[in-house]
Image: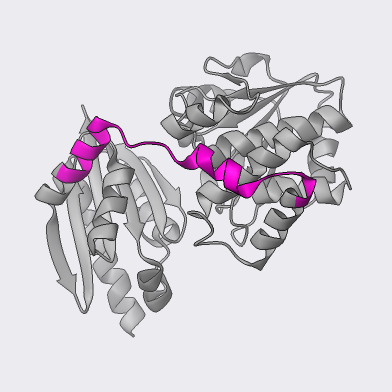
């Protein structure tokens, strides 16, 4: 899909105010892709006002990046005022949390730009979905928009794109050939990779360390064939705890957390597990688990998340069942 399709929709809507929305606890790929897209629109449509919004805040690492780059994020975006809404790195409106209802009710065009497949419900309400699961990140998709228009990103945009790509590829572990070509192009613009990598080196705070240790202590290990599945729960930092369990030796980790009736589950697995089994965490586990928990789930092949309603026991039990079913299918 071309950037021209997006520009056409904005023109047809006669939009003077375009709102770019990121998912809750917006990570560097979401924030940096929104900033780069904002920069692109300012070049091709200078008369249009473009704002970045994140109704449920941004991640600690994203806050750290905001100290290095002139990115402005409105934590109370005016959805009603928007004449076109663009969701970046956000494939379901449920990821917008408190803003999801307002976005669902809007009559203005909704555009989705993401490197995850759009959720059917999102496809139903969106005017246009530009998704590319082969892209390493949403930042890489936005960089390709610059290439399509033969526009060179300025240095701050290039730095943002570099940081978003680096974050979402886990420092290039998940990168492909097109990713490295993009990184080389950004370096030619003036990005110093060694300097910029320092922005992603955030010291782990005390509570995150405690969450990781608690998750390890509470972990229930299940062996299926030669795979080790770790299930655990902590009240915060579920994603970090899941990564820690994989680093400790689990092939797949699911860590849940509960606040009142709401449940969050973070999934992580090794590349070896994904490649050997063909299981895509976002598509095969998170999506059906999110539906089962009356919420939403999605993500990457090796990293995914679920938000829903229910108990930790119910969520993890269903998660394990889905993994077992997929492993049986993979073995046949």
Q: Where 99 falls versus 183 (above or below)?
A: above
- Between 154 and 90, the residue placed more toward the observer is 154
Q: Is any atom of residue 112 visible in this view? A: no
Residue 100 placement (x, y as % from top left): 49, 28
- Between 266 and 125, the residue placed more toward the observer is 266
Q: How many marks?
A: 0
Give me the residue at 62% from left, 48% from top. Answer: 193
What secondary structure is the stretch in magenta mostly built from? helix
Residue 137 placement (x, y as % from top left): 59, 51
- Between 173 and 228, the residue placed more toward the observer is 173
Where are the magenta residues, as a range?
A: 188-213
Give me the residue at 52% from left, 37% from top. Answer: 199
Task: Name the quadrant containing residue 50.
Answer: top right
80 magenta-colored: no
- Please indicate whether residue 195 sits to the left or right of residue 322 in the image: right
Residue 122 placement (x, y as % from top left): 56, 42
Give me the residue at 76% from left, 31% from top. Answer: 39
Residue 131 placement (x, y as % from top left): 64, 52
The image quadrant where one finds the C terminus is bottom left
Question: How is the model colour-coded?
Answer: one colour
- Please indicate whether residue 150 sits to the left or right of residue 132 in the image: right
Q: Where 227 falls versus 237 (above or below)?
A: below
Task: Name the quadrant containing residue 256.
Answer: top left
192 magenta-colored: yes
Residue farthest bottom in this picture: 332
Give me the residue at 84% from left, 23% from top. Answer: 14
Q: Where 326 falls versus 133 (above or below)?
A: below
Q: Is any atom of residue 8 visible in this view? A: yes
């Amino acid at each position: 899909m071309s950037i021209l399709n997006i520009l056409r929709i904005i023109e047809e809507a006669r939009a003077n105010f375009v709102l770019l929305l990121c998912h809750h606890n917006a990570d560097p790929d979401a924030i940096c892709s929104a900033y780069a897209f904002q920069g692109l629109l300012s070049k091709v449509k200078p008369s249009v006002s473009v704002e970045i919004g994140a109704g449920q805040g941004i991640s600690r690492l994203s806050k750290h990046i905001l100290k290095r780059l002139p990115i402005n994020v409105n934590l109370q975006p005016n959805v009603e005022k928007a004449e076109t809404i663009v969701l970046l790195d956000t494939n379901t409106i449920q990821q917008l949390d408190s803003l999801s209802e307002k976005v669902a009710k809007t009559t203005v065009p909704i555009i989705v730009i993401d490197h995850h497949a759009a959720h059917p419900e999102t496809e139903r309400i969106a005017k246009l979905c530009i998704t590319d699961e082969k892209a390493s990140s949403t930042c890489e998709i936005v960089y390709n928009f610059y290439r399509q228009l033969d526009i060179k990103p300025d240095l701050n945009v290039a730095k943002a794109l570099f940081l978003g790509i680096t974050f979402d590829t886990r420092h290039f572990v998940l990168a492909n050939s097109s990713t490295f070509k993009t990184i080389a192009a950004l370096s030619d613009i003036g990005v110093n990779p060694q300097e910029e990598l320092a922005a992603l080196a955030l010291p782990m705070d005390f509570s995150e360390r405690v969450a990781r240790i608690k998750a390890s202590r509470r972990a229930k290990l299940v062996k299926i064939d030669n795979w080790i599945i770790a299930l655990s729960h902590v009240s915060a930092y579920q994603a970090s705890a899941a990564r820690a369990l994989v680093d400790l030796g689990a092939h797949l980790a699911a860590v849940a957390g509960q606040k009142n009736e709401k449940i969050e589950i973070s999934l992580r697995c090794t590349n070896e597990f994904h490649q050997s089994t063909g299981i895509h965490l976002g598509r095969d586990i998170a999506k059906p688990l999110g539906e089962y928990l009356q919420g939403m789930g999605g993500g990457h092949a090796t990293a995914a998340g679920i938000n829903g309603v229910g108990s930790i026991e119910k969520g993890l039990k269903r998660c394990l069942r889905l993994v077992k079913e997929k492993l049986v299918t993979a073995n046949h």
